[in-house]
Image (tube, rainbow, N blue to C red):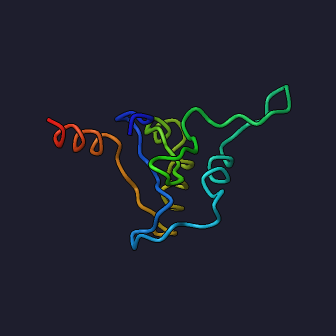
């Protein structure tokens, strides 16, 4: 989980039953909801939401600061994950479990 910080949550593209979530570009689409277009006409992801691949699984990393800044957007992302039965992982718990297993 080196690409995440403890102040983030991870929405994994795997259901709680272990099935891969489709379509394969779901994380790009979901992250794109909060993206903006700059003067150069290029899309930029929000600094609080980004698509990543972790251990071969498509994920969306959400900075917990988004909950304070834009609670509606934060709740939308978590509702999407729950509605689609996706795994939600707290990066802080994930990193502390990893360090306790290596130590």
The quadrant of the rendering that contains the N terminus is top left
Left or right: 94 as drawn, with respect to 83: left
Left or right: 97 as drawn, with respect to 54: left
- Badge count: 0
Quarter residue 15 falls in: bottom left
Q: Front-most of 22 and 86?
A: 22
- Measuring 51% from the left and 48% from the top, which residue is drawn there? 74
- Furthest residue toward top: 39
Q: Is 68 placed above or below 15 here?
A: above
- The image position of residue 37, as x and y in percent, is 79, 35
Q: Is 41 placed above or below 76 here?
A: above
Q: Front-most of 38 and 86?
A: 86
- The image position of residue 98, as x and y in percent, is 24, 42
Q: Front-most of 72 and 63?
A: 63
- The image position of residue 82, as x and y in percent, is 46, 65
Q: Front-most of 79 and 58?
A: 58
- Measuring 37% from the left and 52% from the top, which residue is drawn there? 89
The quadrant of the rendering that contains the C terminus is top left
- Measuring 17% from the left and 43% from the top, which residue is drawn there? 101
- Furthest residue toward bottom: 17
Left or right: 13 as drawn, with respect to 1: right
- Furthest residue toward left: 103
Q: Is 23 placed above or below 70 here?
A: below
- The image position of residue 25, as x and y in percent, is 66, 56
């Amino acid at each position: 989980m080196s690409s995440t910080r403890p102040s983030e949550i991870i929405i994994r593209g795997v259901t709680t039953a272990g099935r891969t979530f489709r379509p394969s570009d779901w994380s790009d689409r979901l992250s794109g909801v909060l993206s903006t277009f700059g003067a150069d006409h290029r899309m930029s992801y929000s600094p609080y939401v980004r698509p990543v691949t972790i251990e071969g699984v498509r994920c969306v990393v959400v900075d917990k600061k988004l909950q304070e800044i834009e609670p509606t957007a934060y709740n939308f992302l978590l509702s999407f994950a729950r509605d689609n039965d996706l795994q939600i992982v707290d990066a802080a718990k994930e990193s502390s479990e990893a360090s306790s297993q290596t130590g």
